[in-house]
Image (spheres, rainbow, N blue to C red):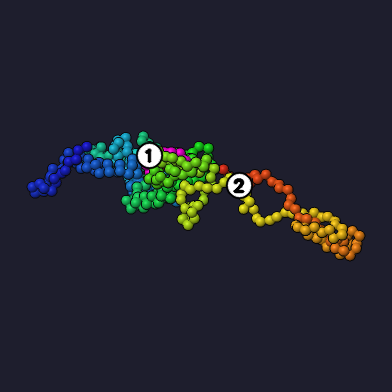
Amino acid sequence: MNKTLGNFLTQANRDFPLDCETLDYLQKLAGLAALAGNIAGDRVVLCGCEVNDEGTRRNEGYVFVRTAGNPEGEILPWEGGSTTGGMYVRQEDMAVSANNTDYPKAYTRRSLAPGIGEENFRWEDFTDIRTIKELMTENGQLRAEIKRLQPAPLGVVQMWAGRDVPEGYLLCNGQELRTTDYPELSEVLGTVFNTAESAGGVRYTTRSGYFRVPDLRGRFVVGQHDSDNDYRTCGGAGGLKAVALKTEQIPSHCHNFKDYYYAEASGILSGNYDVIRTNGGVGSRSSDADNDGLPYYRHDTDKTGDGLTHENRPPYYVLAYIMRAR
């Protein structure tokens, strides 16, 4: 459809021929204006058409809709009424008489009316138009919700109970990755784990142009601590699953037993011995020293124990550690 401007007020004496061509031109201009409704969609409530409390009726108003007669879209008035039985495009010819001449189809009135006709629509397919301010408010709310729901940052380690690692994540198994394949993750991790200790206790070597994720297989994780040499560096590792105690780790203690013997005629020996006093109640019950107590020697017991290791872990539960990579 071409756009033609009418120079109505620039003619001499401001007279302009009002003929059928002029009226057709004006009608086409109105059609061009209606095309702007496509910005909002093909079936849009422009104004009015408020729904009653029961949701069964709508007030009068205007809608933009693409119809068979105007596939590019037109603005039609809604006559108001019930919405439960559908609506259709009502088209009525309007007659005009002028200069002793009848024009039975001088005008055609088009509107949307309740009921069923040749071209039907449903209110459920129409949407209410939003102002720019309303759209900006909704957009801000949507952005805030998206921000709240966005995934964890790259490099975040999480526990995973699923069978397969989810898309965009990697298993924290110390694997070597090409920097060009994961540039954002490489920027986050750097080379921190390139020489870290593997799950088997051996330090990794990493090729140029590659980097590694942490190897957390079979590991407990402890928080990084600048004031503790054991925990100062990310990627540091230590600890043992089982430990055999060393002599210096056992609390100081001893074992001995009392080796009794009876000695007559003051036959008390010298050395590592002691006496249990009996007040003359031993042997012949005489008054000499050998009847006054039970001498004994001190001896160490035989050694026992196999020196095996003992469990050095708290109660544990196995899950996989994964890291967001993309």
Circle 1 packing at 10 Å, graded few (<14), some (14-19), many (20+), is: few
Q: Residue at x 33, y 47 (%)?
A: 46
Tell me the magenta residue range: 174-184
Q: Is 42 situated left or right of 293 in this image?
A: left
Circle 2 packing at 10 Å, graded few (<14), some (14-19), many (20+), is: some
Instruction: Please name whichever residue, 51 or 211, is drawn nearer the observer in this view of the structure.
Output: 211
In the rendered picture of this protein, how many numbered marks are placed on residues? 2
Rendered image: mark on residue 16:
none
Q: Which residue is drawn at 75% across and 57% down?
A: 272
Instruction: Please name whichever residue, 291 or 143, is drawn nearer the observer in this view of the structure.
Output: 291
Q: Is 17 situated left or right of 179 in this image?
A: left
Judged by depth in the image, the label closer to the viewer, 1 or 2, is 2
Residue 180 colored magenta?
Answer: yes
Secondary structure at numbered mark 2: strand
Instruction: Please name whichever residue, 232 or 6, is drawn nearer the observer in this view of the structure.
Output: 232
The spot of residue 200 in percent (x, y) is: 52, 40
Q: Which residue is drawn at 28% across and 38% down?
A: 72
Q: Pointer 1 and pointer 2: residues touching (CB < 8 Å)?
A: no
The N terminus is located in which quarter? top left
The kind of residue on which mark 1 rests is Ser
C-alpha gap between disc 1 and disc 2 = 38 Å
The spot of residue 153 in percent (x, y) is: 42, 47
Q: Is 290 situated left or right of 242 in this image?
A: right
Q: Residue at x 45, y 39 (%)?
A: 175
Q: Name the residue under label 2.
A: 243
The kind of residue on which mark 2 rests is Val
Is residue 299 something one can see in this rendering?
A: yes
Instruction: Please name whichever residue, 136 or 307, is drawn nearer the observer in this view of the structure.
Output: 307
N-terminal of the two: label 1 or label 2?
Answer: 1
The spot of residue 295 in percent (x, y) is: 81, 58
Rendered image: mark on residue 208:
1
